[in-house]
Amino acid sequence: MAQAPAADKDALLSKVTAAINPEADGDRKELIRKGLAALADLNAAGMKPEDSLSQAKAKGNLSGDKTEKMSKMLMEMWSLNTPRMSEPATLEALRKGEMPDPALKRP
């Protein structure tokens, strides 16, 4: 698949940054769901989830135990649900910050 345009990539990385930022405003579950969808979109554009997380941390200037814990949890959810991360219905729900049906597996 073609590379995501830079503006889209930045917007998607911002969602990943919010998902792993313990100080981010908003509903934590919703931020994580949107972060997972962003990881899936970046992955489809050729960026591995691990690379997306690294860039998101750098973009948000994030570090520390809480950020690492959130990053680890996001990657665990990705790993548990990788086969579903290309399903249109799953991604549509996650992009809205909603839990898809059936629910995703959680660590």
Image (cartoon, helix red, strand yellow):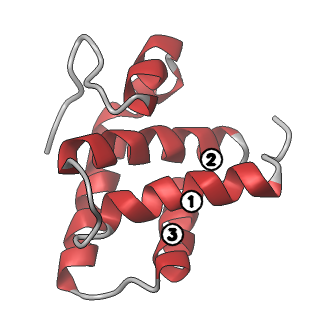
- The disc label shown at residue 13, or none: 1
Identified at 86% across, 39% down, the residue is 2
Q: Which one is in front, 7 or 88?
A: 7
Crowd band around label 1 with a 10 angstrom C-alpha radius: few (<14), some (14–19), many (20+): many
Cβ atoms under marks 1 and 3 closer than 8 Å: yes
SS label for mark 2 = helix
- Is 79 situated above or below 16? above
Q: Which mark is in front, 1 or 2?
A: 1
Question: Sequence-wise, which precedes: disc 1 or disc 3?
Answer: 1
Where is residue 65 shown, x and y percent of the image?
19, 84
Q: CA distance from mark 1 to mark 3?
A: 5 Å
> Looking at the figure, which quarter contains the N terminus?
top right
Question: Which residue lies under the disc numbered 3?
Answer: 56
Mark number for residue 42? 2
Q: Position of residue 90 (x, y in %)?
A: 41, 19
Measure the C-alpha gap from mark 3 to mark 2. 11 Å
Q: Amino acid at mark 3?
A: Ala
